Amino acid sequence: MKSLLRHLAICVRLWLGFMSCACIWLALAASNGAAQETVDVGKTGFSEKKPVLASACPHGCPWGELGDYVKDAMAPLGYEVILCRNCNRDQGPRIVAKASMPPELGAQDTFVGTTTRVNAPVDFGITESGFLAQAYAGKFSYASDGPFQNLRLIAKIEDPTYLLAAVKADSPITDLKQFAERKLPVKILGGSTPISQPVLEYYGLTADAVASWGGSFTNPIVAGAVGGSMLEFDLILNELASPANNPESSIWGIVSQKNALRFLDITDEVLQRVADDKALGVTRVTAQWGLLRGVDRAIPTVARSGHAIFAREDAPEQATYDAAKAIDEHRAALKWFIRPYSYDSQTAWKNFDVPLHPGAARYYRERGYMEGTKPSECTAGSAGSATPPSAREDAPVPREKDEGCHVSALGAPGSPATAAAFIALSFAAVLRARRRRHSA
């Protein structure tokens, strides 16, 4: 009887796995048949104040949300930003670097709601902070056609996700090494990324080994996008753990709510190994209690944070200055999206080894954000400065023209220099009036 029940359970499990894969395949196939359209957006480019931005889907994709954010932020400065919704995944940096036209729409695009492409070369973009660093260095997926060292940072927006590993609470597994030790036919949600794969391989969960035991890997992003509630799994492990409902992280909310999970520790040795690889763009952190249902303690791990807005080195300095300024001044809008975005003036101008565009650098120096700088009230010869800015070590790069400081010969409104100059001019006027009366 026990043998019969065990075989029945295996059959049910296989059937559920088959149905889950079938649902994913059917969803992708159906989406590929959706209406697709190429839109002629006319003459574009920074020179037209109509640049094309490599973005992503309109339905909760982080680079799609941030595309909307950048578009809205730059509008008051006279820019009409055109969003390329299918310049996404790891393609954004290479499309921008090569000033390419957007690719043709594929099943993965229409599946997440992107049904149009624009017919114009791409000027700047948004991507994951690590992707930009990898593209600049020519590593991982950019090794074959990179490095793309003409890329320059404009700004970085913070947005944390965590590397976590979990099994179902009733699983006999208490340590990740037990899967390989027992050669179990483990069904894994995750893998195949530069961050998660080294961790899985450290525990002997290579693609060949898992396949030889009768196990499998499933893409967690696709699984989350189709609901994932029927999906059978033994282990979920990737670096996108977050309670947010964007397509990339939604699987974590689904499986942690549908199942009681037990989160496993990842050994310090492999965590440090991953953190030491600067091209991966992660840092050692602690995932706090309650991050997701089932996280019942503080868990040491690694995490990544940040999406980069970037351009080519040939982008006009004034345009990247304007973009950096708009992103900073519009920062209050970041709290209204589905991801926990934030703007940190101490990190907005840093992205590993990727150089900052000179126009953006000028803005951050003027604001005093960059190390060794102080806020500037405008240009060469700032009012109230006894020493010309060009002679000071902390001098900001002079502005090409007044960008809103409204500094007159009297100095900045409300500044001590303005008040002193006003008093001096008033006193001089009184003296001139007295001399005229005496001479008369």
Image (tube, helix red, strand yellow):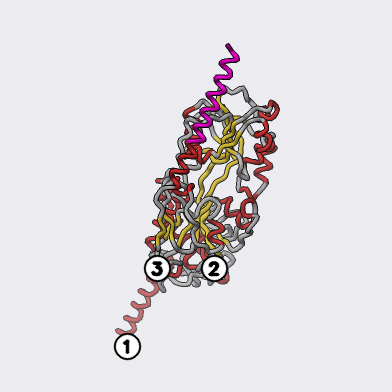
Question: Which kind of residue does numbered mark 2 sit on?
Answer: Asp
Report the number of discs: 3
Residue that badge 2 annotates:
314
> Which residue is pictured at 46% across the width and 51% down the height?
56
Residue at 61% x, 42% y is: 192
Q: Of the residues tagged 1 and 3, which is closer to the observer?
A: 3
Q: CA distance from mark 1 to mark 2?
A: 64 Å
Which comes sooner in the sequence, label 1 or label 3?
3
With 13 as the anchor, is 73 left or right in this view? left
Residue at x-position 48% and y-position 34%: 228
Q: Earlier in the sequence, mark 2 or mark 3?
A: 2
| In the image, residue 50 above or below residue 328 | below
**Few, some or many residues within 10 Å of mark 1 (<14, 14–19, 20+):** few
Residue 406's mark?
Answer: 3
* Mark 1: amino acid: Ser
Binning the other alpha carbons within 10 Å of mark 3 as few (below 14), some (14 to 19) or many (20 upward) gives few
Front-most of residues 326 and 183: 183
Residue visible at 50% across and 52% down in the picture: 88
Q: Which residues are magenta?
A: 1-22
Which label is found at residue 439? 1
- How far apart in space, not on screen, are marks 1 and 3 (Cα)? 40 Å
Q: Residue furthest top?
A: 1
Question: Which of the two marks, 1 or 2, is nearer to us in this view?
Answer: 2
Specify the amino acid type for callout 3: His
Asked if disc 1 and disc 3 are in contact, CB closer than 8 Å, the reply is no
Relative to 315, is 94 above or below?
Answer: above
216 sits left or right of 323 in the view: right
Please name which of the two marks, 2 or 3, marks the residue nearer to the observer. Answer: 2
Residue 122: percent from the left, percent from the top? Answer: 49, 62
Where residue 348 appears, x then y in whole percent? Answer: 52, 54
Callout 2: SS: loop
